[in-house]
């Protein structure tokens, strides 16, 4: 009888105009205040007037639809796995190991040497592609004056023998005519560790400017540099073997 009255009250309340939020509270009150079941067939073993056993909430590790079942084995039975490995995308670890195992390519040894029969550096009037004498000798006015005095009408050095492609004052040539680490450091700011590469690059630029990029002079210079570099590398390897 109490249940019937409660059901009628709920029906009347559903049809009446109420403020928002009151109806859910009333229904909740009915379901929670009454200890009797809401109706229907009794479950097996249930006594008359006894409320249905309410389902208890599952533990935190309860299975959620669409997800994998949680691992319930003891921690000691499970194999330990680093966090980084678990979070790494599939295949990334293999790719990383392959890159790591690749040996580093050794840097090619470059050793400069003057190629006889060239003389491209004796073309003192270099053209607009190169720094001007005023820029190179801005802090050395006496060297600037000497450099300009050596330039002939055709742009070549007055001391250069075009027939033999040799220098007539080679032993007494000025300081700036010497391809040495000290000269490159003082005039161009090139450290000793980069002298050979910078000297080779400067010679290549001069040869291309004077004779062309497909000239025999350029091919000869590259051959000389290759031989000198290989010779220097072999001597360094012998020194390392002696040290060990």
Image (tube, helix red, strand yellow):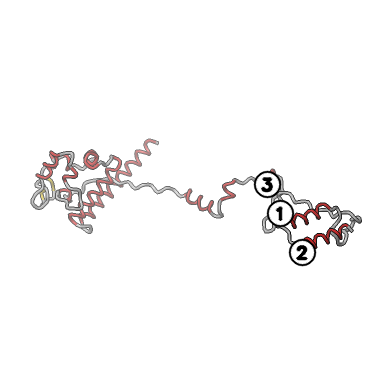
| SS label for mark 1 | loop
Residue 203 shows which numbered tag?
Answer: none
- State left or right for residue 181 relative to residue 20: left
* Point 22% across, 52% down: residue: 205
The quadrant of the image that shows the C terminus is: top left
- State left or right for residue 54 relative to residue 105: right
Please report whichever mark, 1 or 3, sits nearer to the chain's N-terminal start: 1
- Within 10 Å of disc 3 (Cα), the crowding (few <14, some 14-19, many 20+) is few
The image quadrant that residue 146 belongs to is top left
| Position above or below: 24 against 80 | below
In x, y percent, where is residue 102? 46, 50
Residue located beneath label 3 in the image: 78
| Labels 1 & 3 near each other (Cβ < 8 A) | no
Q: Residue furthest top?
A: 243
In x, y percent, where is residue 229? 29, 46
Residue 15 shows which numbered tag?
Answer: 2
Q: CA distance from mark 1 to mark 2?
A: 40 Å
Please report whichever mark, 2 or 3, sits nearer to the chain's N-terminal start: 2
Please report whichever mark, 1 or 2, sits nearer to the chain's N-terminal start: 2
Q: CA distance from mark 1 to mark 3?
A: 20 Å
The image quadrant that residue 40 belongs to is bottom right
The quadrant of the image that shows the N terminus is: bottom right
Residue located beneath label 1 in the image: 63
| Labels 2 & 3 near each other (Cβ < 8 A) | no
Q: Residue furthest left?
A: 153
């Amino acid at each position: 009888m109490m249940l019937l009255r409660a059901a009628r009250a709920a029906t009347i309340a559903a049809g009446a105009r109420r403020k928002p939020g009151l109806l859910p509270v009333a229904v909740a009150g009915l379901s929670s205040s009454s200890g009797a079941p809401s109706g229907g067939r009794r479950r097996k073993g249930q006594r008359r007037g006894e409320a249905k056993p309410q389902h208890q909430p599952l533990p935190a590790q309860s299975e959620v639809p669409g997800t994998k079942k949680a691992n319930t084995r003891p921690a000691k039975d499970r194999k330990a796995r680093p966090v980084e490995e678990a979070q790494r995308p599939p295949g990334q670890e293999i790719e990383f190991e392959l890159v790591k195992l690749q040996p580093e390519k050794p840097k090619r040894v470059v050793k400069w040497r003057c190629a006889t029969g060239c003389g491209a550096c004796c073309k003192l009037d270099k053209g607009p592609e190169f720094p001007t004498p005023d820029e190179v000798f801005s802090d050395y006015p006496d060297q600037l004056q000497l450099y300009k005095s050596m330039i002939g009408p055709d742009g070549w050095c007055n001391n250069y023998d075009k027939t033999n492609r040799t220098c007539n004052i080679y032993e007494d040539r000025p300081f700036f005519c010497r391809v040495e680490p000290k000269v490159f450091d003082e005039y161009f700011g090139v450290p000793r560790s980069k002298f050979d590469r910078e000297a080779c690059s400067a010679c290549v630029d001069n040869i291309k400017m004077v004779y062309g990029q497909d000239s025999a002079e350029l091919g000869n210079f590259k051959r000389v540099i290759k031989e000198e570099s290989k010779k220097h590398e072999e001597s360094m390897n012998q020194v390392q073997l002696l040290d060990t």
